[in-house]
């Protein structure tokens, strides 16, 4: 811990020398880039390391500025490395994110000689994006859509690594930086930490700026356009973050008022929990943007005027507008659909009888999804308790067969042996990472099932109390 703090202070001095500052007035002679407006703090229940308000902050106030010269981009890494530029020039088909991942590994290969070394030391050593999930963790998600998304992410990661291998061979990277695990680290760094810049779709790594933890957009913001288009009414400035050509810096603004000590958060946009897992490697226990997607009957597709991603149950258990409209029209006799189509698509009920059929269909759909899962909501809660105390696990014969099978599958897939009912498990660092990914999978499926269960309750209340 003491070494980590020393490295952090060294990094903040390095950042200050580059002009990174939380002060509205630039001061390159400052010994640290933080302390006037923000400070590094730890929030164990809300993202871990993050940035806290060092004083009272008003909404719309400039809270951090990172000059363009301090941004880690493909352009700056390539322009300062002739060997990297020559190697990449032979493979023009690589994507922008592959190029930045290769350039990042190339910098890591330089070690202390890299100009970016103080920043590289601050990056996490591992991530928990879906691309890092093994087959056990993928299957632990239980829901077909999530399993498919995870398998697709892993396949994409391996394909991109294989395509990038020839370039990394030309660069003579150290063997440990040529592995798939090293590629996962680099690509996860790009996926989870880069910020949008207008001149490169891969984005940029933003020292200090990537210390902000995530907050979902609030209700008014979710109904608007992108975060970058949200303006503060009083200051006429962005209330989140973006690259400002006028000052050639990435500028961060307070989204709301903060008291001293509050965690200052950044919104990356609206994401479901599965999308957060896929792109950032975490999820939220209370995510207003979470959804449980519902598949339609084959004959419903011709009646649906909305894209598939509009057919869902929202985080509070209520069916989406598109789902309700489609099922209402489907539940209408074919001979009457043309005459009531405008009613269904305006979001209004067609009739009490029709609405009852709609609620019954949606509730039955949710029940079918829940019954198809290997574990119940209560069993998932028990599993989360077991995972939190996994090192002390000695076997619990009263567990259901489903949970016993899942625990056994984890132990086998990670080559962990249990010496007996009174023997604690020996858990290596690698196994602890696997346990954490397992926990993420169980947390995700538990929250997904809660949405389905809440929807059943909602539909039941609508059937019991028709208005």
Image (cartoon, grey):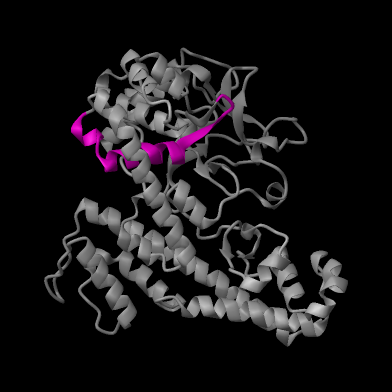
Q: Is residue 130 left or right of residue 288?
A: left
Residue sitting at 17 percent across and 65 percent down?
Answer: 425
Q: Is residue 69 above or below residue 463?
A: above
Q: Is residue 187 magenta?
A: yes
Residue sitting at 71 percent across and 73 percent down?
Answer: 327
Q: Is residue 221 above or below residue 317?
A: above
User: Looking at the figure, which quarter contains the C terminus?
Assistant: bottom right
Q: Is residue 272 magenta?
A: no
Residue sitting at 66 percent across and 50 percent down?
Answer: 218
Q: Is residue 402 left or right of residue 231?
A: left
Which stretch appears magenta?
A: 174-199
Q: Is residue 271 above or below residue 147?
A: above
Residue 319 in view (yes/no): no
Q: Position of residue 406 (x, y in %)?
A: 30, 72
Residue nearest the viewer, comparing 240 with 179: 179
Residue 9 is drawn in which quadrant?
A: top left
Q: Position of residue 344 (x, y in %)?
A: 80, 69
User: Looking at the figure, which quarter contains the N terminus?
Assistant: top left
Q: Position of residue 136 (x, y in %)?
A: 31, 63
């Amino acid at each position: 811990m003491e070494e980590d703090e020393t490295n952090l202070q060294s990094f903040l001095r390095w950042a200050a020398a580059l002009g990174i500052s939380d002060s509205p007035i630039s001061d390159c002679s400052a010994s640290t880039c933080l302390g006037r407006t923000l400070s590094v703090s730890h929030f164990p229940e809300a993202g871990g390391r993050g940035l806290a308000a060092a004083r009272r902050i008003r909404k719309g106030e400039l809270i951090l500025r990172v000059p363009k010269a301090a941004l880690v981009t493909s352009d700056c890494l390539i322009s300062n490395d002739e060997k990297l530029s020559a190697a990449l020039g032979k493979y023009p088909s690589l994507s922008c994110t592959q190029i930045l991942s290769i350039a990042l590994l190339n910098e890591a290969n330089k070690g202390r000689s890299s100009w970016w070394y103080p920043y590289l030391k601050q990056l996490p050593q591992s991530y928990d994006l879906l691309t890092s999930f093994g087959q056990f963790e993928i299957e632990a998600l239980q829901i077909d859509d999530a399993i498919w998304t995870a398998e697709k992410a892993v396949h994409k990661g391996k394909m991109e690594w294989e395509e990038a291998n020839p370039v990394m061979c030309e660069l003579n990277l150290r063997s440990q930086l040529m592995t798939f695990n090293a590629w996962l680290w680099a690509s996860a760094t790009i996926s989870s930490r880069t910020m949008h810049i207008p001149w490169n779709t891969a984005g940029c790594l933003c020292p200090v700026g990537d210390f902000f933890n995530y907050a979902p957009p609030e209700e008014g913001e979710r109904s608007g356009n992108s975060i970058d288009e949200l303006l503060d009414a009083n200051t006429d400035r962005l209330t989140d973050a973006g690259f400002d050509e006028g000052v050639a810096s990435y500028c961060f603004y307070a989204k709301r008022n903060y008291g001293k000590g509050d965690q200052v958060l950044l919104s990356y946009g609206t994401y479901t929990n599965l999308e957060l897992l896929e792109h950032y490697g975490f999820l939220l226990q209370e995510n207003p943007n979470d959804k449980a997607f519902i598949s339609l009957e084959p004959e419903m597709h011709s009646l649906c005027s909305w894209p598939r991603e509009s057919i869902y149950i929202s985080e509070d258990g209520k069916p989406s507008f598109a789902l309700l409209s489609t099922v209402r029209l489907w539940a209408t006799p074919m001979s009457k659909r043309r005459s009531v189509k405008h009613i269904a698509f305006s979001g209004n009920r067609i009739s009490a009888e029709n609405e009852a059929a709609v609620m019954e269909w949606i509730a039955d759909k949710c029940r079918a999804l829940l019954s198809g899962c290997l574990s119940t909501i209560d069993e998932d809660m028990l599993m989360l308790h077991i995972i939190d105390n996994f090192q002390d696990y000695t076997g619990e014969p009263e567990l259901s067969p489903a949970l016993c099978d899942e625990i056994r599958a984890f132990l086998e897939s990670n080559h962990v042996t249990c010496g007996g009912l009174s023997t604690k498990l020996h858990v290596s660092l690698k196994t602890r990472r696997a346990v954490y990914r397992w926990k993420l999978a169980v947390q995700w499926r538990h929250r997904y099932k809660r949405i389905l269960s809440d929807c059943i309750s909602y539909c039941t209340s609508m059937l019991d109390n028709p208005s």
